[in-house]
Image (spheres, coloured by chain):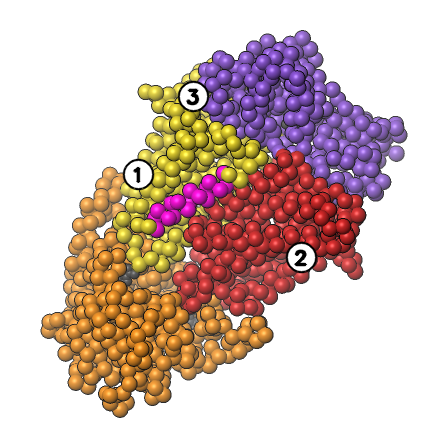
Chain colours: A purple, B red, C yellow, D orange
Amino acid sequence: QDAKTIGVSIPAADHGWTAGVVYHAERVAEQIRKEHPGAKVIVKTSPDPASQANAVQDLAVQGLDALVILPTDPDQLVNAIKEVKDAGTFVAIVDRAPSVNDDSVRDLYVAGNNPALGEVAGEYIKANTPDAEVVVIRGMPIPIDQQRQDGFDKGIAGSNVKVLDRQFGNWNRDDAFKVMQDFLTKYPKIDVVWCQDDDMAVGVLEAIEQAKRTDIKYVVAGAGSKDMIKRVMDGDKMIPVDVLYPPAMVGTAMELTAAAVFNQVPVRGTYVLDATLITKDNAKNYYFPDSPF
Amino acid sequence: MTANDDNSALARPRRSFRDVDLRAVAPFAALILLLIVGALVNPNFIGINNLANVATRSAFIAIIAVGATFVISSGDLDLSVGSMVAFVASLMILFMNSGAISDPALMLAAAALLAVGVGALCGLANGLITTLGRIEPFIVTLGTMGIFRGLTTWLSQGGAITLRQPELQAMYRPVYFGSIFGIPIPIIVIFVVAAIAAFVLYRTRYGRHVVAVGSSRDVARYSGIHVNRVRTIAFVIQGLCVAIAVLLYVPRLGSTSATTGILWELQAITAVVVGGTALKGGSGRIWGSICGAFILELVGNIMLLSNFISEYLIGTIQGSIIIIAMLVQRSLVRKS
Amino acid sequence: MTANDDNSALARPRRSFRDVDLRAVAPFAALILLLIVGALVNPNFIGINNLANVATRSAFIAIIAVGATFVISSGDLDLSVGSMVAFVASLMILFMNSGAISDPALMLAAAALLAVGVGALCGLANGLITTLGRIEPFIVTLGTMGIFRGLTTWLSQGGAITLRQPELQAMYRPVYFGSIFGIPIPIIVIFVVAAIAAFVLYRTRYGRHVVAVGSSRDVARYSGIHVNRVRTIAFVIQGLCVAIAVLLYVPRLGSTSATTGILWELQAITAVVVGGTALKGGSGRIWGSICGAFILELVGNIMLLSNFISEYLIGTIQGSIIIIAMLVQRSLVRKS
Amino acid sequence: MKSADPAGADVVLSARRISKSFSGVQVLFSVDFELRRGEVHALMGENGAGKSTLVKILSGFEQPTSGEILLDGVPVKLPANGAAEALGIVIIHQEFNLAEHLTVAESLFLGREVTRFGVLDRRFMRAEARRVLDMLGSHVDENALIGSLAVADKQMVEIAKAISRDARVVIMDEPTAVLSREETRVLFDQVRKLRAAGTSFIFVSHKLDEVMELTDRVTVLRDGQWVKTARTEVLDGESIAQLMVGRELSSLYPAKHEPDIDENILLSVRSVSTGFVKEASFEIRRGEIIGFSGLIGSGRTELMEAVVGLRPRLSGHVAVRGQELPSGDVHAAIRAGLAYMTKDRKHKGLLLGEGMTANLTLQSLARHSRRGYLDPASEAAAMDRARRRFDIRVRDNAVAVGRMSGGNQQKLLLAKVMETEPQIIIIDEPTRGIDVGTKQQIYHFISALAREGRAIVVVSSEMPEVIGLCTRVAVMREGRIAGILEGSEINEHEIMRYAAGLKSKAA
Ligand SMILES: Nc1ncnc2c1ncn2[C@@H]1O[C@H](COP(=O)(O)OP(=O)(O)OP(=O)(O)O)[C@@H](O)[C@H]1O
Ligand SMILES: Nc1ncnc2c1ncn2[C@@H]1O[C@H](COP(=O)(O)OP(=O)(O)OP(=O)(O)O)[C@@H](O)[C@H]1O
Ligand SMILES: O[C@@H]1[C@@H](O)[C@H](O)OC[C@H]1O
Ligand SMILES: [Mg+2]
Ligand SMILES: [Mg+2]
């Protein structure tokens, strides 16, 4: 009865957020194994779409009852996912959704709200600094990043908030440091930085501090790493808020999937987690000092 | 980047025929070793299904590695192949999405032709800049790597480019997923490409010239060989191989983005070197490169099927296995 | 991977002193050209602040490139440097976090020593596997690249490793952000490292041996040079340079992650080649490599400061600029 | 035997008022030269006189700075890079022009592969290669990789390559420098055969006896200038040498000095075996010059490399002054004062891309270091000394060694090894490609070294050299020392008998 196999395919821990994903996936996998002795939960990480397609295939070879997947690049994995789905396996997609995201590709979709992540950040800026000149540091050129940009633009729509520049920081601290240094050279006055990822915020803050620039009022990042939440909690002026995009969502998806597989609970459809705005008041609810992220 | 076997070969009194043979056989020995390791790691490993999967998916790197064998044999290097895959695939999908031709079969044929043409042109660009500009191929192809990657990002506006027409998709899908007489088509393609390449490299005048050019530019030139032409054609062959890989890649993932093919150049070069071709040029082993691509894919597969290695340590184990595989090869050759 | 200038050098009747000089000067000409382009693109570009920023942040690649100049001159290649940075930095921060030594100054010194030691050992490992195992350095260091990266991921459990002691952080920060007589410390370090390296390469027996080994392993061996020892030491020097880069890297963000140093190997090699060192070995230009690192960093900086380039096309423009810079260099040398 | 007087015969290829400069340094000054149908025309001159440069111009590999080339009396611009082959002009370069990764058969046909329906006809090319090699009496395996061949075998491949072309003009730039008597004889037979059929040859050599034996006319160059063209008959070795050097030559070889019988044994080699060499033993005393003779591939080089540790020995002992040397450890040999000069100067001797000084001091840098760093002034002084001592002549001091004339490279190599001031010196083909004038200097130099108390092994394919210089001569055959000759036994006839296996005695 409990001798079921759940495959979990996630991106390799290539930056803080994905590291969080790996952490939570391993954590919940252990938990499921404990609750269902005899259950097999196999967690596999992959660095890029092609190797993730391989990983999915390799998981399938081991005989899967369910697949939980957080695709590195969703559209490129649709075929591989379909293959599994068509074999009758329960499929849950996490976070990054393919362009066609219906029950022909998956049974369950659990995600943070990418457009909302941008929108919440945009709205916060609009509300607090309605005339702000903003520089944006993007992630990597993949669809969710585009969704966030679009959300952001929607969030600031109709205000005087002006985007001075957008450049890619690849969700990487060092790249963000560089980009921010150059933004500071390029623009004598910047009010707000939106860098939509907590890892990148680390580099951004260093660059601002080095330049001793006082014009920048604050930085909005996102995801909810423990370091940034701590700053919010401590009332750091530069990081007044953070937008939640919890890597723990993979765990949620795994728990739901386990419920479907072991207890035949009918979990289907879409679960979108809020892109909650973390402020000084609610920060402690999101602070997990033991997480690697 | 001088090979080491160079060293050893010259230190030994004379390279006997047995040596040459063992050198060619060594990668296959490493492959067999890996198969054994795999079988021990997971019983599913040795199943026909799994092995077919692995061989099938090694098609991209294997076919690109065939082209790389030409480029490397002729003494050059191409770092742009990974981004070239992304670029060619993007153009191909965009063309198919354009709906310029309504008949799906015709459209598919035209798109394939386009891909091949674009691939050849990309290779030609690499070749001409390298030879006419007299710049290190490393730099040229690092530059074009950036160029192709950037163009892809721009074409996709940072997102993905996805094949939209369902009939086309349906018609095209079997090219990766189908099989003939039970053999997956990509595997057949690997072998056909390798056989043609081996023929060209070993049995034609051009192939001879590739090796001569890679062994010594001056000697080749003094023998009346058009060195730059030979080198440029090698880059074009590389471009064609990339295009063929794309023809298999598109039906598999049906979509591309700026992340497609990242680091494939390193994998292709590794496959070539693991297969016994020396990076300094002057010798090429087509079948070795295929074997090298299988080895790389197998290592990844074993990692995936083994359930006792921490996900964090995969890179470590993979790196170690590759080094060990090479040590095994070397010790084999040395014992002879 | 034979260099082209090799070709041209032999094709040309004779390498005169004028040539040699121009060859050494060419990268600097490209640098000046870039400075002019930059000044046209954005007036802020030429400000002291911006140039100091650029020079400062080029320190990592520049210093690593100094080590790479040794490895490449001796005819080898090291692809592992990027992961080595991550690995060494992680160990260093973990050690500082361990609190094993309570006095912060002492702790810092001990941590620096540890970093240097680990860097040297990593280099030694690369060197010994390459020379004793007689495997292509490309493969060995691709393997250790995976190994170091994997170990880092494992140490950090995929996340970041952050320096926790605030006093340590405060004490250490100036090593990157501070300056002496108005010159940022990293820039001073670049020049000190380069000066020492140039001295070693051009003015010591060891340096001569490096070049000899890189030009011809056999001639070196017949001249009684310990070829393997020379090669191994070059890898160790590379490891030491990586460690020095780490000493500057850690105080910048006070943390590392599994992505630290990704693709730095390609950048370092590019800097070396752009600086005029041939990939086939046998010649090394320390100052050229420094210049190459500046060029790379400047190109990125100009891209960001320019207002008219789509962020999607940055890779494309960057690639083109590098190729053009090389063409400018070549044409300069050829005109002589 | 000489062919009929070719005077009045038609001129195939000629050079008129050819001058050549390299980056502003002139090396040929308005040289005239003509080659008649069916003649063998010797081109002679000191090292660096410009012979190789002239023949490269005559075959299109270099273009003259001024002057013209006439083919069949018609001015032509010879196409570059060996394309002149299509016009029937083939050259054997002084430096080998073979790709290490190709096989012998592949090399013979490089650039003019035979195909059938676009497919390489490998079997035909192999058979054809075999045929030509057999014709030249060469036992080189047509399937062997060039990289695995001994220097002399490479030379045979070069010769085979040229001969197999259907050429009207064959230019041979020092083809016999590394060949033994026997190979030379076979080569000459072929040349005579082709000459009879109307082929013309330009023959560049420093070996006067060969020139006298084979050629119809001689042209002498000195310092890039034409000096004289004359029928070989009217000249003799001495007069040619005099034309070349511009002065009279005294006796080539210095007087021999037998070392005392109770002199210390500096080097003793006992029962050394390698893959090919079997049980070789010899010893050498202070002040002694011992020669090693034998046919190509008889194993002399392999033995010497094993002695100095450049290759491992399978068994046997090597001791310097009674101190055993470990196998395969060249550094131990160097420390013990035992040095070896390779005959493969291109691949093992010199860094062709570097300048002269860097090459000269490569093996002896310790002597130019002060407190750990190199002293360029001291290196420059060494270079000056070496240049005088070995008469190294270049017109441009900064020239890359690969661009120096062959003979001057050889002198530099010799100088490089001597810089280490070894007590025991093994010299493999000491005078390969060196002109008579300098040869004499080198012989006197070697003899002086011996008199200073050093021990010298001369491995040479030039029998007169071994005979003129050595007090004992070891003859190798098929990896064994067939005999060690002394006193009156040292003559060509005896040496040949041992070398050919007609005679042997326990060493
Ligand atoms: N490509 C070149 N660049 C510069 N100098 C050159 C080049 N080729 C030849 N020389 C110079 O031209 C001069 C004549 O050289 P060449 O090789 O013709 O002499 P050679 O008569 O063949 O001597 P040898 O008997 O030693 O072979 C030498 O001083 C040599 O250094
Ligand atoms: N019959 C044979 N079988 C195998 N190998 C042979 C044979 N004859 C010669 N060789 C090879 O030839 C080499 C001997 O060449 P070596 O260079 O030592 O001879 P050498 O007397 O110095 O002649 P050279 O005039 O070519 O310098 C050995 O390495 C050996 O492997
Ligand atoms: O990798 C991404 C992460 O960095 C971002 O913050 O959230 C979404 C993830 O997919
Ligand atoms: Mg010459
Ligand atoms: Mg010999």
- D446 left or right of D354 in image: left
Mark toward the start of the polypeptide (3 vs 1) = 3
Q: Mark 2 points at which residue?
A: B190
Mark 3 vs mark 1, foreground winner is 3
Q: Mark 1 lies on which chain?
A: C
- Label 2 to label 3: alpha-carbon separation: 54 Å
Indicate the position of residue C191 as horizontal and vertical percent values.
Answer: 34, 31
- D129 left or right of C227 in image: right
Residue at 61% in and 45% down: B87
Q: Give the amino acid at mark 3.
A: Phe
Q: What stretch is highlighted in magenta?
A: C318-334
Marks 1 and 2 belong to one chain:
no
Q: Look at the numbered disc 3 and give the secondary structure of its residue.
A: helix
Q: Which mark is residue C177?
A: 3
Q: Mark 1 points at which residue?
A: C199
Indicate the position of residue D82 as horizontal and vertical percent values.
Answer: 39, 69
Q: Mark 2 lies on which chain?
A: B
**Residue D402 visible, this orientation:** yes
